[in-house]
Image: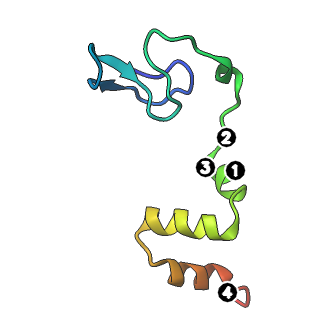
């Protein structure tokens, strides 16, 4: 099942009295009001990465790629090549 608000995959949340489908990306729960976020335009990963500071981007990329932060920071900071 896809989330009607953001389009991500919804997961079954069984931590309540009864099971509900929940989107862990935007927080939407099955049967709730869609809220104001439904009109928000989706941003791409590139746009999200571009909005980060240098240090945030290094941490984000190093965790995602499994590279040491210091090596990635040195590589990204190298503007001579």
Give the number of the disc on residue 47.
1
Q: Which residue is mark 2?
A: 43
Q: Position of residue 35 (x, y in %)?
A: 63, 16
Q: Which residue is mark 4?
A: 78
Asked if disc 1 and disc 2 are in contact, CB closer than 8 Å, the reply is yes
Q: Residue at the location (50% across, 28% down)?
A: 27
Q: Residue at the location (45% across, 9% down)?
A: 31
Q: From the viewer's perspective, is residue 12 above or below residue 42?
A: above
Q: Which corner quadrant of the image does residue 13 belong to?
A: top left
State the CA–CA distance, disc 1 to disc 2.
6 Å
Badge 4 density bin: few <14, some 14–19, many ≥20, Cα 10 Å: few
Regarding mark 4 in the picture, which secondary structure is present there? loop
Q: Which residue is mark 3?
A: 45
Q: Which corner quadrant of the image does residue 14 belong to?
A: top left
Regarding mark 1 in the picture, which secondary structure is present there? helix
Q: Position of residue 63 (x, y in %)?
A: 45, 65
Regarding mark 3 in the picture, which secondary structure is present there? helix
Give the number of the disc on residue 79.
none
13 relative position to 56: left or right:
left
41 relative position to 17: left or right:
right
Nearer to us in this view, 79 or 66: 66
State the CA–CA distance, disc 4 to disc 3.
23 Å
State the CA–CA distance, disc 1 to disc 3.
5 Å
């Amino acid at each position: 099942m896809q989330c009607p608000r953001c389009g991500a995959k919804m997961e079954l949340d069984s931590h309540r009295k009864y099971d509900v489908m929940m989107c862990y990306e935007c927080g939407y729960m099955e049967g709730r009001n869609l809220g104001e976020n439904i009109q928000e335009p989706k941003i791409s990963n590139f746009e999200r990465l571009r909005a980060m500071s240098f240090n945030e981007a290094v941490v984000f990329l190093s965790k995602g790629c499994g590279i040491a932060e210091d090596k990635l920071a040195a590589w990204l900071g190298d503007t001579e090549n």
